[in-house]
Image (tube, helix red, strand yellow):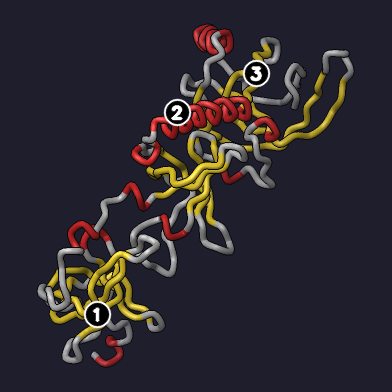
Amino acid sequence: MANQEKVTLTTVESWNSQEQFYELTAWHRNNEMVTGVVRSIVDKSYRAVSDDNSTKSSNAEVLIIALPNGTTGYCAADNFLTREFKNYKQFVGRKAHFYIDSILIEENMLILNGKKAQEQRINLLWEEILSYEKEGTLATHTFKGIVTGQHNTNGGIFVNVDGQDCFMPRIEWSWNEREALSISEGETIEVKILRIDSENKRIVVSRRQTLPDPYTFLEKLKVGDSIAGKVSRVDPQHGIFVTLESGLDVKASKVRALEEPVIGDMVNCRIVKEIVRTENGRIQGRVVIVKYPNGKRKVKDLGQFLFE
């Protein structure tokens, strides 16, 4: 659905009052960027009239956008983002930014362009990044990003920062050494920029660098010292893990006299392998569980009722 084409759709009217119409025309006249929520996605037939008055009929995937003043906008899928997607249903319920392409008065229809808004946001972001880099302060700045997915092979995380697609290596998610990451698409997180490639417009980010560094406290502990923790994982293959200060997970064992722990047990541990920071910035150590200071959590045996 190109610009300067008249589009005819069977749609809900975009505005219902003169006040709404005046507000939309003001946004359009002032070239204001607006934020909307993707309400739904439909396949619609449309008639496009180009500048030479030729017409064509086709089908298009159209995103229906709810705007904050109670109006409804329409954005063709190929004008939504700079990158094409096979399925746009993943964006239903998410916020997005738009410019108004046109207001079709006869059809009472508002045509939006998300791609133009994304390009503008990306340009502004790069101006900001390059300014910080020139000042030598880039590493000190935090940016908000939205998790958009995870790499199937290397487990890296895709994050969108102000319209710019960024990549986060798996180890930069947190300070923990875990087999699996707990991420949610659409989740808003804070990140810092690790590396940029301004020529190819690539950015590598880190969530870990925005989190409190647990090593600040843990580096003071020596082998034999005691520390409190909470059992976070009990795996038949990988063993026991305990969460220590600031959410750091370390490998754990237990003294022979204790019962097997379950997830959620509060534990008293003794450090058996000094907690250190490795060359790649990860924090590693090992503890042994010596006591359950609050008592042992009871796990209900679902088959016990057969013997009661």
Q: Could you say where residue 276 lies in the image, as x and y percent from the top left?
A: 27, 68
Is residue 279 among the parts visible in the rendering? yes
Disc 1 element = loop
Give the labeled residue for mark 3: 101
Amino acid marked by disc 2: Ser
Mark 3 or mark 1: whose residue is earlier in sequence: 3
Q: CA distance from mark 1 to mark 2?
A: 52 Å
Vertical side of 72 occupied by 84: above or below: below
Do callouts 1 and 2 mark residues in contact (Cβ within 8 Å)? no
Q: Could you say where residue 179 lies in the image, as x and y percent from the top left?
A: 43, 70
Q: CA distance from mark 3 to mark 1?
A: 61 Å
Q: Nearer the viewer, residue 120 or 57?
A: 120
Q: Quadrant of residue 53?
A: top right
Q: Could you say where residue 50 lies in the image, as x and y percent from the top left?
A: 83, 17
Give the labeled residue for mark 2: 131
Give the labeled residue for mark 1: 261
Circle 1 packing at 10 Å, graded few (<14), some (14-19), many (20+), is many
Amino acid marked by disc 1: Pro
Q: Quadrant of the N terminus?
A: top right
Circle 2 packing at 10 Å, graded few (<14), some (14-19), many (20+), is few
